[in-house]
Image (cartoon, rainbow, N blue to C red):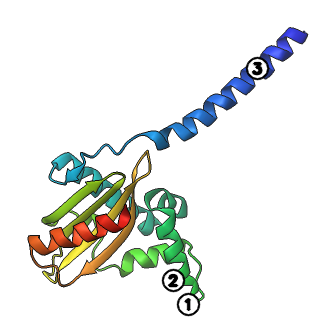
Amino acid sequence: MAIDKSLAITACLSLGAAGLVLAFLGGAWPNPLPQGPLDDERSLLRIWAAGAAVDAACSRGDLGAFADAVTPALRERLAQRLAAVDRPLDGTALRELGRGRQRPYAELLVQPLLAGEVRGEHVVVAVRRPERDGAQVLTFVWDGRTLRLDDSRHEPAVQTAARARTAVEAVASRRR
């Protein structure tokens, strides 16, 4: 009987250790998007999917899905802005955030790509806004498992591909 107990304890410890290894293993996976200028259709599809995940989490008011779709830094910035007006980051705030945006991220990310860059775990894209009032510059971070939205900014002065490349380069350089 003592052998069975020690075997069970060893098996449990082994499973626990394997779980810890697997939990941290994903973070070691390199960004699957090709490094450098972004022009691959499959890469753009992955970026679109990341934006659509944020849209879906906001429309459902799903804090867990939102946490999976954005970086902790973006959640913290959003929580600070909400706290400034005495609002918690909750499901209602997420739904209002989704409705308050002029365009869902998935809709923005099917607009013409003006420029894009992949550097390490960072991905920065500039897409033409449908209203033709500049570009939307979005930043994503590869966390070892998935792309997460880290920032989205309207850049009214970015009207051309050349200016978009400059804006993307500036953001990508700050992220390193």
Upstream in sequence: badge 1 or badge 3: 3
Identify the residue at horizontal 15%, vertical 64% (top origin).
113
Q: Position of residue 66 (x, y in %)?
A: 48, 62
Identify the residue at horizontal 33%, vertical 61% (top origin).
51
In the figure, 12 relative to 7: above or below? below
| Label at residue 81 | 2
Identify the residue at horizontal 10%, vertical 70% (top origin).
161
Q: Secondary structure at mark 2?
A: helix
| Residue, far bottom | 85
The label nearer to you, 1 versus 3, is 3
Pointer 3 residue: 10
In the figure, 153 relative to 173: above or below? below
Pointer 1 residue: 85
Q: Position of residue 49 (x, y in %)?
A: 31, 54
Badge 2 amino acid: Arg
Q: Secondary structure at mark 3?
A: helix
* CA separation in Å, label 2 and label 1: 7 Å
Of residues 56 and 25, which is closer to you in this image?
25
> Does residue 156 appear left or right of residue 160 in this picture?
right
